[in-house]
Every structure is written in structure tokens, then in C-alpha cells.
Image (tube, rainbow, N blue to C red):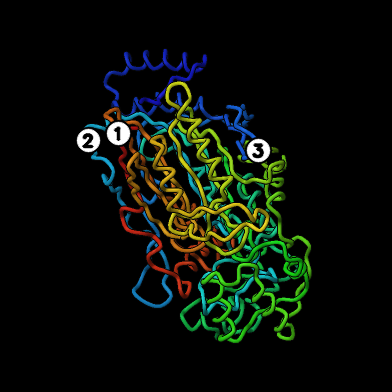
Amino acid sequence: MSRTRSVATAAQTATHAASRAASRAASSVDRRAFLATTGAVSLSAGIGYALRPATSHAAASGPAPVALSRQAPAAPLMPYRGGTTLGTVAAPRGASGYRRLGDGPAWDRVVRGDLAAAKSGREGRRTPLAAFVQFTDLHLVDVQHPLRYEYLRAQTASAWRPQEALSVAGAVALVERVNALRGAPATGSPLHCVVTTGDNTDNNSRSELDWFLKAMSGGRINPNTGDPRRYEGVQDSGLKLYWHPDDRRRDSDKALGFPQIDGFLEAALREVNSPGLGLPWYSTVGNHDALPGGCWGPGDSYFSEFAVGGRKLMSLDESRGAALWKAVKKGRDPKGAQFKELLKSEARRMRSVTPDESRAPFTPAEYVKAHLDPAYKGHGPAGHGYTQENLESGTQYYSFRISDDVLGISLDSTDPGGHYEGSLGTAQMEWLERELKANEEKDGGGSYVVVFSHHTSRTMRNLRQDPDRPREGRHGGDEIVSLLGRHSAVLAWVNGHSHKNAITAHQTPRGSFWEVSTASHIDFPQLARVVELSDNHDGTISLFTTLIESSAPHRTDYADLSQTGLAALYRELSFNAPGAKPALGGEPGDRNTELILKKG
């Protein structure tokens, strides 16, 4: 069944005429370049449409126009490599100790035929269907937030990272990279949008949410809370557990070769300016966006008061820390009772910090409202996928139009009952099935579908009940794979959470699709991913994935504490972070790929 349709607009009529004329006048033009050009123009007609979220209380009512301030740019004539990991990738110099980065060898594209054979000659036949960029796990961090558990660093490397004070500068450099891309690197089609797949913030904090929305949509960001005149976090605590960049203290990180960088903390708290994405963007929620610490059920007033208060725990007996983190990993403390007891018992060890109301946690409704705020619209769409309907129904999932031929579905995979692994509630699961069925029943066979979530199929094992819906069941990754596999329109499930590049082929009795999981932008190698869909006109679809780094140079200069210099340091520090996992970049088949699928 063919889903590649004509867009019945005057603009496309003109495009067809122009294409015929171009074909007659440029018979010597490379066919692939010509197809990329003509396909790009027809795709641009699909931008500017979104679907109202068909929640469990309301059905989808069809496409609704969304005002955007920018159309898709003209496509380049040919595919390209520059500005992507197909050109170069940050790589370490030297063999041991603290290592500087420089330009390294590119990651070539790997063709994967796990689900269908790649047929020869497809390069000259293909036409693009859609192209978008995935951001995931930005983890914009308020490094002075009282609820942060940096003292668990010995138990988990994610508790505190030497680079995280620079997360805002790093995220803005990623925005700049996307703005500089000429289009989609494999097909040359225009980029239609950017989609985040959760953990946009780190501490479920209003200040971090403001930083994220400004980074994406444009604005000036002051990545500082508490005392506006000075830093009040662990990096000037005098504790050897943490890297102290501004003094000669022999801390545990300097013992490993971390540098002394005078003025680092002052520079890290300086205002950052984001140009905002030059594309429409859509938002998906993650566990760090919804849960205190990314793992404890929300709603306890103690944690809300502690977040905005004037006390912060910076050190902890290692045995107590090990016991707390073991309980978290095993899911034994979903509501944070053990964490709460620990904080109360360690009151004498806490240090004074400046209270700040902006550190208060945000609720799901406040998360949606913030996205709907016109101040954060940028290049749109208004709400970045969320609508008033989400507010009224208390949901954070929706459908949206990526292009004429491709429908996006954004899910909320966080379990409100607590724990960092995810699942879907029955109401959302039933909504997802209705969306897929409604798409297939449309005239012409409907659209291809790409599903977005924060959690991967393997990390959706948390079936703890939602406290607000005690009679509702929860559904894990295996059930979701089975559901998606029953609908041949589904081409891909795009997600994050694991901070690792991994691409998994899913074959079910009724269909097949690719699961594309992308590394974070806080842990090295700090990547985002361009995803392109193309019809090969031979019974197959190609799904291209191309990884990109931020615009910051690979080489750093410790004397350069500009916004760009800090973004470069962000990458280098993340590579050297103690406990960093070297395998997060994945294998070659998880990076830059061409993934082949049979047409449904």
C-alpha cells in the first residue's frame, strides 16, 4: 500500500511545473541531486501542521494549521558530510591520564539489512519522505540545587559530573550546530523539525525548565540560582571528592590530571545567549523532567520545601550512600522515604546556601503551561506539541505532523509512581492503539509513523501503579513492541534515557520497525541524531541516521572562557569524567546508518 501522496496545493502545482522544466533543461544533472531538490520542495508543504492530542477523553479532530515564522530552507543539491560525524569526530590525544581532544576519524555509514535486503540502484531512485533532528537527555543542570545528590558520586557517575556546570553552554552550541546544517546529510532534503526525547532538565526545577525553553527557542539565560554574586555548590566546598577548578587544592580529580582553570566557576555562571532553533521543535517528557532526582515519586511537600530552602548536603558516609543508591536501583524507595529520612538525619552536616524560589519543582501541568507560554514559542509550533487539551485532560502525549507522509507520536513513558525506569498507563496505551488504527483507516492508507519516547523498550520494566490512577494497569516495553509491530505503518521508535547509541531491529509476526536510541548530550560523546526517511521505489524504505556533535571546536583553550570555549570544555571534561562509560558511543551499526525496511 503506497502512502506517498501529492500535496494538493497551488505551491506544489508550481513545484511540479518547475520540476518538469528543470528536468528538460538539465538532463545532465545528477538524478539523485534532482530528486533531492524536487522532493525537498514538496516536503516543505507538509511543515506547519500539527494534530490535536487525541487523549483518553477526546478524539483527534484532524490536522490543525500552526503558524510558523519560517518555511523549510531550500535543500542542497547533494548529500554532504561536513558538520556531522561523517566528517570528523572528537577523539582523545595520548594514551592515559587526563586527555585532550582533537579532530578524529569519521564514523562511516553502515547499511543494515536485518529487516530487509538493500537493493542495488536505490540511490538513484529514492525520494525523501521526512527528516528531523533528535535531541535527548540534555540534562540542563542547576549545579547548586539543594536536592542534588552529588555525594553519591562514588556509587554512580551520574550523581555528579565535572562538566555539568557547563550544560547550558553545551546545549546552546548544539542548537548552533543544527542551525548551521544545510539540510539532511544523506538525502539533501530539508530538515522539518527537532524533537527532544526527554530529560531536558535534571532536577525537575523551574529554573532549569526556563533554561531549556530559552535554549531551544532563543533568549538570554542566566545559569545561576541562589546568590547572584557567587557560586555556592560543591566545587568550592573544599571537599576532595569534587574537582575545584579555581584553586590549587589537590582534589581527587586533579590527582587524575584535571587542570586548574582560574575563573572557571565565574564564567560558568555568566549569562549565555541562545539564538534558538531555526526549525520548529517538539518536546517529549522524561523521568528527570517529572520526578525529584529523576527517581522519586512527586508530591511530597518536604522535597518541595527543601528544594527552595537554604541547606544543602555535600558529603555523606560512603556506607550510607551505598545503601541509599542500592535501594534506588532496586526500586525499593519509589516515594523517596529513605531519601527523606537520610536528609533529616544529616541536618548537622548540611551547609548553608541562599534560598531560591526558582528551584521549586514543576508539576506536569506546569510543564505543559510553560511550553504553551508565547515567550517560549521561538519558531513554533505554539506549545511545541502540547495543547490546551493536554492541560484539560492531564496528559503529556500527543500526535503531530512531521511531513505530509510521516506522522509523529510523542509518548509520556515516566511512571508517576516513582523509579527511573518507565512504562505506559492503560489509558495512554489504548490511545496509542487508537491513533495507529485511525491513521491506517485514512484515505490512501494513512501515513508512515515514527514514535518518540524517553525510555527504551528495555528500560520500560517499571509497572508500579500511578498513585493518581490506582485502578489503571501499567504496560512495559515488550507490550509496546508488540503493539507497534502490529501496525505496518510504524517505521521507527526513537528514544533516549540509556545515554548510549543503540539501534535494534524489531521483527514481529505482522510487521517490523527499527528502535533508534541515541546517546545523551551530557555524557561523552555528547551527540544528537539526524533521522531521514526515504522511499526507494523498490518495495523498501531507507531510514538514515547521522550523528552530530555541537558546534564547539574539538580542541580546547583553558584561557578561552567565552561561551564557545566553555562548550568545548564541556565536551573535553565529559570525556575525562571519572566513571565515564567508554561504550556509550555504541558500535558502528548503532551510529551512522542506513536501515532498510520493507514497505507495508
Rendered view: 74 above or below 374? above
Viewer-nearest of discs 1 and 2: 1
Question: Residue at label 1?
Answer: 540
| Amino acid, disc 1 | Thr
Instruction: Using the rendered image of the protein, determine whether residue 161 is visible from the camera's viewpoint.
Output: no
Instruction: Using the rendered image of the protein, determine whether residue 461 is visible from the camera's viewpoint.
Output: yes
Q: Nearer the viewer, residue 228 or 187?
A: 187
Rendered view: 476 above or below 401? below
Q: Look at the numbered disc 1 and give the secondary structure of its residue.
A: strand
CA gap between label 3 and label 1 equals 37 Å
Viewer-nearest of discs 3 and 2: 3
Question: Residue at label 2?
Answer: 119
User: Which residue occupies the extreme front position in the image?
Assistant: 471
Q: Quadrant of residue 385?
A: top right
Viewer-nearest of discs 3 and 1: 3
Tell me which label, 1 or 2, sits earlier in the chain: 2
| Amino acid, disc 2 | Lys
Tell me which label, 3 or 1, sits earlier in the chain: 3
Give the number of the disc on residue 57. Answer: 3
CA gap between label 3 and label 2 equals 45 Å
**Image quarter hosting the C terminus:** top left
Q: Residue at x 45, y 53 (%)?
A: 477
Mark 1 Cα-neighbour bin, 10 Å: few <14, some 14–19, many ≥20: many
Residue 255: percent from left, percent from top: 49, 84
**Image quarter hosting the N terminus:** top left
Q: Look at the numbered disc 2 and give the secondary structure of its residue.
A: loop
